[in-house]
């Protein structure tokens, strides 16, 4: 990967991070979670529930969204470890890297 390609990747990553950060607040700041499915689901129901989870929660604009599903028995919240300070440090580093390259 060339230096310019890594910079483009950094810019794309920063854009995605900004979108995810925006939707974290827009979607109620719901932290990541473990979705425990009901034990008696058929293989087809498991696939359908998994597809519903992916469709609802995948992507930067769906970060921190809630989900309602008949296939989910329990949701266990995982730690939400992104702090504002870490986010600011990452943005500063990416901005400096892009500016130096230009």
Image (cartoon, rainbow, N blue to C red):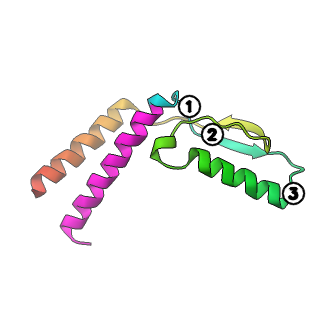
Residue for point 27% across, 41% down? 91
According to the picture, the residue beneath numbered tag 1 turns out to be 30
What is the magenta range? 1-24
Q: CA distance from mark 3 to mark 1?
A: 29 Å
Residue 45 picture location, percent across and down:
81, 54
Q: How far apart are the two marked residues, 3 and 2, measured between alpha carbons?
A: 23 Å
- Asked if the residues shown at circle 2 and circle 1 are in contact, with their CB atoms under 8 angstroms apart, the answer is yes
Q: Tell me which residue sits at (62%, 34%) in the image.
A: 66
* In the foreground, 42 or 78: 42
Task: Say whether marks 3 and 2 touch (CB < 8 Å).
Answer: no
- Answer with mark 3 or mark 1, whichever residue precedes in sequence: 1
Where is residue 102? Give x, y as percent: 9, 56
Q: Quadrant of residue 33?
A: top right
Q: Which mark is residue 33?
A: 2
Q: Earlier in the sequence, mark 3 or mark 2?
A: 2
Relative to 79, residue 41 above or below:
below
Q: How far from the left and from the top, in percent, is residue 80?
A: 52, 35
């Amino acid at each position: 990967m060339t230096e310019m390609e890594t910079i483009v990747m950094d810019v794309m990553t920063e854009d995605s991070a900004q979108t995810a950060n925006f939707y974290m607040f827009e979607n109620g700041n719901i932290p990541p979670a473990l979705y425990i499915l009901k034990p008696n689901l058929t293989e087809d129901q498991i696939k359908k529930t998994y597809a519903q989870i992916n469709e609802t929660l995948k992507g930067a604009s769906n970060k921190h969204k809630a989900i309602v599903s008949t296939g989910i028995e329990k949701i266990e919240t995982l730690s939400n470890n992104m702090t504002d300070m870490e986010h600011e440090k990452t943005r500063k580093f990416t901005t400096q890297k892009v500016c130096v390259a230009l």
